[in-house]
Amino acid sequence: MEESELDRHMLTKELQRVMLGHHRHEQESNAFLSRGVEASP
């Protein structure tokens, strides 16, 4: 029981890390696109 609890906890932490990384990448892409749009005449 404890082992599966630990596995689920680790899985959740990994998932959160991946989601956060993806979100940060998405924000960077949006910022880059925004700059590109602003820079264009």
Image (cartoon, grey):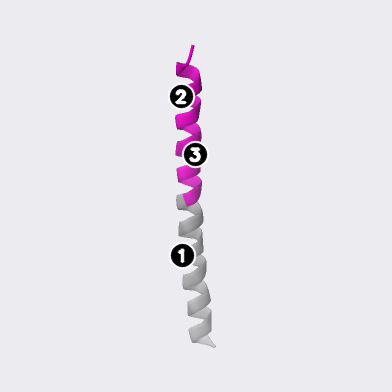
Residue 16 falls inside the magenta stretch: no
Quadrant (top left, top right, bottom left, bottom right) of the N terminus: bottom right
Left or right position of 39 against 1: left
Badge 3: residue crowd in 10 Å (few <14, some 14–19, many ≥20) = few
Mark earlier in primary sequence (2, 3): 3
- Residue wearing tag 3: 27
> Identity of the amino acid at label 3?
Gln
Q: Which residue is mark 1?
A: 14
Q: How far apart in space, not on screen, are marks 2 and 1 (Cα)?
A: 32 Å
Which residue is rendered at x = 50% and y = 63% of the image?
A: 15
**Spatial separation of the CA atoms under disc 1 and disc 3:** 20 Å
Q: Position of residue 33 (x, y in %)?
A: 49, 29
Q: Which numbered disc, 1 or 3, marks the residue that appears first in the sequence?
A: 1
Q: Amino acid at mark 1?
A: Glu
| Residue depth check, mark 2 versus mark 1: number of the one nearer the observer | 2
Q: Residue at x 49, y 78 (%)?
A: 7
Q: Which residue is mark 2?
A: 35
Q: In terms of secondary structure, what is the magenta stretch mainly?
A: helix
